[in-house]
Image (cartoon, rainbow, N blue to C red):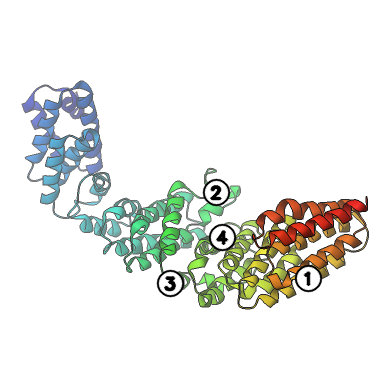
Amino acid sequence: MNAGRVLATSTSRNVVSEVTRDIVMRTSDMYELFELGRSVGLERQRNGSMEMLEAVVRACSDEQEHLAGALALAGGVFVATQNKHARRVCDALVRRQNGAGGPSMLRVWCELAPYIRLPNIHEVVAEAERMCDVSVLGNLAPFVSEQSVERVASAVHAASVDVLLRMEMGTASYEDAHRVVCAAAGVAQHLVDGTDRGLDRVWALVSDALASTHWASVCTSSDQIHGDVGRAGSEDYRRACTALVSYAQRQSSERADAMVNAVFALQPCLRYLPRSSVRVGRGREGAVLFYMDLLEHIAGQLTTRTVNALVMPLAVRYVQSVERDWFESAHALILSVLDAGHAKVAVWYARVVLALYPQRINMDLLDISFTAAIRALAHSSSPELSQSCIDLLIARIDECAASGVERGVRRRELLCVLASQVASVPLDLLSFVMTSVDEHVDCEPLWATRRDVVGHVQDTVLESAELERRPVLASWVWRMRARVDARL
């Protein structure tokens, strides 16, 4: 009968105590002892023989020379049973334990940390750093103090950079990246409710750790990663990203600016990556993709200076990318910038999206993008620039004036986009846009196009218009509907 079976079934206190001491003395793998304690605890709890279980724990508490082994065994019993006596013994053994107890004890500390206060947690963290065990660092991160979490974040960030470099040499695996992501999620728990200014540095380190391993979320199937992890990432990844966004959105514009400047300093490729077509799966290009997605959610916190100097140059680089993920993220970032009221790029962006239609974007995306540019200008200090955007759109409509099925479809879609602007343009420009729509609808040879434009305004635009515009727009739509019906 093996020793574990004796501890789980014996009815003799003396036998249990002697076997416990013998196992603790002879076993060098601390996690093996922890697992043994867990299995013994579950077996004794199932059989209702808690008296013998306490004999095991008491024998651990009497141990003097092999404290780490006794703590591992008693800890396994406690985690499995939540026994109060086992808890007291573990607390006492933790206080007597000097140092981390060696590399094999690290996983035991991870198991105990959610239940027992660890006075020696900084020694355990130091041992994990020495062993480069990023999984242990991530598990212990939620339990270190806010004053010490930067040390853990720095170690996790260093591990992420190592994974990134090995990925570019072809020697990193998805599992390597996943371990870093899990560790970063552990560190990010400090950001959920934290407000201390020292956490700004932690935010930057966690952000860059996730960015450096983001290639694992955008790899193609040929990269042979797990199929259940895609652009949205794992549960740990999503939890960490939520913490990052939540923390940034609680800060002032000055602090948010400083945090974004810090990540641009950590990841030079955000500034200097060559302007070329993006290849999916490349490590630093994956980092850029991560940062565009992150900045999309915090653009409203940033000052115009940071948006113009850092954010927009990054988005401009990929606004016409041939790769879908980078293309979509760049446009989502620009829309977020416009929504935040940074209107300096609005006219340029209106010109860009008109050039991308219809080869790269459809009517719905054009409508969303163009309207965002108009709204940003309408609420800016230069609302008159809206006229330039409208003129660009009208010129594009006039280019489709010739006959032909394809040109007819494009003309109808562009007219619908123009009609949508009556809900967004500055009030001074409203009559001009309404007149332009009237003129183009009246000159439209296809009745179906005239009907679709009127229906689009009536069903969609009126709902999104401000209350003060609705009476004017309703009357205008009624008159336009009457003219269209009269030409049946």
| Quarter-of-image position of residue 385 | bottom right
Q: Residue 340 location in percent, x, y? A: 55, 67
Residue count near mark 1 (Cα–Cα under 10 Å), binned few <14, some 14–19, many ≥20? some
Residue 300 vertical placement versus 214 (above, below): below
Instruction: Give the Cα separation between the discs numbered 4 and 2.
Output: 15 Å
What amino acid is labelled 3 in the image?
Ala
What amino acid is labelled 4 in the image?
Arg
Residue count near mark 2 (Cα–Cα under 10 Å), binned few <14, some 14–19, many ≥20? some
- Front position among marks 3 and 1: 1
Q: Label 1 belongs to which residue?
A: 432
Residue 455 vertical placement versus 81 (above, below): below
Instruction: Identify the secondary structure beneath mark 1.
Output: helix
Instruction: Identify the secondary structure beneath mark 2.
Output: loop
Q: Which of the two residues, 479 or 74, is positioned nearer the viewer here?
A: 479
- Front position among marks 2 and 3: 3
Q: Which of the two residues, 107 or 475, is positioned nearer the viewer here?
A: 475
Q: Label 3 belongs to which residue?
A: 262
- CB-based contact (under 8 Å), mark 2 and mark 3: no
Q: Label 2 belongs to which residue?
A: 230
Instruction: Give the Cα separation between the discs numbered 3 and 1.
Output: 46 Å
Which circle's residue, 2 or 1, is located before the other in the chain? 2
What amino acid is labelled 2 in the image?
Gly
